[in-house]
Image (tube, rainbow, N blue to C red):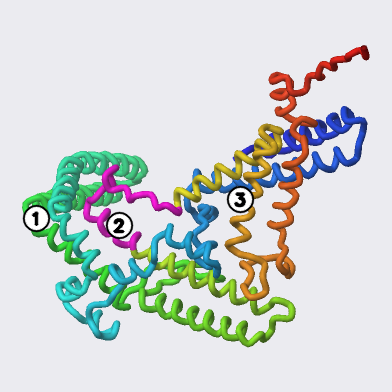
């Protein structure tokens, strides 16, 4: 990210340029405030875009959440939000292909089934992805066995050296023959234990190498059974839970139960809204938006975790991701990348005063799309974390009007690169006045 010192220097440069430009315009207050408005909006757009770009460059982590507009659009109640929802994956498709139970049984009963029976209950899509990996798993087992066979003698030699050094130190510290004998006996026992460990490692590695094919088949069965136990509720996986500091082991049915509860909360909130209960200060509309967003996020996270679990099992069998395995970029993800670079670029143009009028119109168009997604109308809930209680007019619409007003003013020529472009093109040169004499 940009160093703080650079940000402060940029802010100071903007203020100095603002004062100089106002002075050149004969200290007109309207010029000062119009330029200040343009710089403020440009600054906001630029750093909003840079923050989104930075989140993608860093990647997902405990302290960083990668920017995505998916929850924002999926929770939208408008037709525009519905159009954008089609640009992202539908969690229900993942639920049907990777999280549908195949046995009508309780988690306790499922846990008692044999490994083979559990494996047979693995959802078809995941089982199909794992069943094509026997050769890869066999190769991985042989490779690991070969590494153990090759590394065992070296590890044994290092342990012998360590034992010899310890024996020498104890012999040196021994005060009588009895102490020396104890030290020597201790070292001999350690050598025997080390040799036994080496022989066991070599024998186990050779056994794994010879039976790699059978072990690979067993590993695949175990992987399918592990996934099936999660799907059928017999085994949990660490999951991040809101307001809980540490991960909680949850099964797929438990997470579905939470999703169903959220669906009930959404239905109840919509019913209260239809009855116009609690709408005086917008509490119910905000609550409805928050619950709807929680539902969208919960569904998306469960679908993502199902895909991640399947990938984790494949990786454990020796599968490695290649360029051919890279999933196709979704239209929604492409729109996200365009959006964050678009916002940063428009913000930079507004700050520099480059193509100012066009930049104002483009930025206003972007704000119109945000308003169409979550309009400030009384019959629609507002997005979560909305400040105040906007009615028909919200901050995005106000900023849009401000940008359109700036688009009709030559603020780029008052302060910015547009002035240089205009001078180079001769737009600012005084026109010749032809004086004709009366005859």
Residue receiving disc 2: 311
Q: Earlier in the sequence, mark 3 or mark 1?
A: 1
In this view of the protein, which residue sits in the foreground, 97 or 159?
Answer: 97
What range is drawn magenta here?
307-332
Q: Earlier in the sequence, mark 1 or mark 2?
A: 1
User: In the rendered image of this protein, does residue 6 appear above or below residue 298?
Assistant: above
As helix, strand or loop, the secondary structure at mark 1 comes to: helix
Q: Nearer the viewer, mark 2 or mark 3?
A: 3
Does the magenta segment cover residue 43? no
Q: Residues within 10 Å of mark 1 (few under 14, many from 20)?
A: some
User: In the rendered image of this protein, does residue 283 appear above or below residue 12?
Assistant: below
In space, the residues marked 3 and 1 are separated at their CA atoms by 57 Å
Q: Residues within 10 Å of mark 2 (few under 14, many from 20)?
A: some
Q: Earlier in the sequence, mark 2 or mark 3?
A: 2
User: In the rendered image of this protein, does residue 75 appear above or below residue 308?
Assistant: below
In this view of the protein, which residue sits in the foreground, 244 or 281?
Answer: 281
Does the magenta segment cover residue 331? yes
Mark sitting on residue 366: 3
Q: Is residue 377 left or right of residue 142?
A: right
Question: Residue 38 falls in which quadrant of the image?
Answer: top right
Furthest toward the front, the residue is: 439
The residue shown at (53%, 79%) is 266
As helix, strand or loop, the secondary structure at mark 2 comes to: helix
Residue 199 seen in the current view: no
Place of residue 183 in the rendered image (x, y in percent of width and height, measured from the top left): 28, 48
């Amino acid at each position: 990210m940009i160093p703080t010192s650079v940000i402060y220097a940029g802010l100071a440069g903007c203020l100095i340029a603002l004062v100089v430009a106002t002075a050149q315009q004969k200290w007109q207050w309207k010029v000062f405030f119009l330029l200040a408005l343009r710089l403020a909006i440009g600054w906001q757009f630029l750093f909003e875009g840079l923050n989104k770009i930075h989140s993608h460059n860093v990647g997902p982590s405990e302290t960083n959440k990668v920017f995505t507009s998916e929850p924002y659009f999926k929770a939208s109640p408008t037709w525009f939000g519905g159009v954008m929802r089609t640009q992202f994956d539908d969690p229900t498709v993942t639920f049907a292909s990777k999280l549908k139970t195949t046995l009508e049984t309780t988690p306790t009963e499922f846990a008692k089934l044999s490994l083979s029976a559990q494996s047979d209950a693995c959802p078809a899509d995941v089982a199909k992805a794992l069943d094509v990996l026997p050769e890869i798993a066999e190769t991985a087992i042989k490779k690991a066995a070969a590494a153990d066979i090759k590394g065992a003698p070296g590890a044994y030699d290092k342990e012998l050296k360590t034992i010899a050094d310890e024996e020498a130190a104890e012999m040196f510290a021994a005060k009588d023959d009895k102490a020396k004998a104890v030290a020597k006996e201790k070292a001999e026992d350690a050598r025997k234990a080390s040799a036994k460990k080496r022989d066991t490692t070599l024998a186990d590695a050779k056994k794994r190498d010879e039976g790699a094919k059978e072990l690979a088949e067993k590993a695949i069965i175990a992987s399918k059974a592990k996934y099936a136990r999660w799907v059928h509720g017999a085994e949990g996986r660490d999951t991040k839970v809101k307001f809980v500091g540490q991960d909680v082991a949850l099964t797929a049915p438990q997470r579905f139960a939470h999703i169903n509860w959220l669906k009930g909360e959404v239905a109840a909130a919509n019913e209260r809204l239809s009855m116009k209960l609690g709408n005086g200060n917008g509490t119910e509309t905000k609550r409805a938006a928050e619950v709807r967003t929680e539902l969208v996020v919960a569904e998306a996270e469960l679908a993502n975790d199902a895909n991640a679990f399947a990938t984790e099992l494949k990786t454990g069998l020796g599968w490695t991701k290649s360029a051919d395995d890279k999933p196709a970029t979704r239209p929604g993800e492409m729109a996200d990348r365009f959006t964050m670079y678009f916002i940063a670029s428009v913000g930079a143009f507004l700050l520099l005063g480059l193509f100012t009028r066009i930049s104002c119109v483009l930025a206003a168009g972007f704000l119109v799309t945000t308003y169409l997604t979550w309009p400030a109308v009384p019959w629609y809930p507002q997005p979560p974390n909305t400040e105040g209680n906007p009615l028909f007019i919200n901050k995005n619409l106000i900023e849009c009007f401000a940008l359109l007003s700036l688009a009709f003013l030559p603020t780029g020529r008052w302060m910015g690169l547009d002035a240089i472009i205009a001078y180079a093109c001769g737009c600012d040169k005084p026109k010749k006045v032809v004086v004709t004499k009366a005859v």
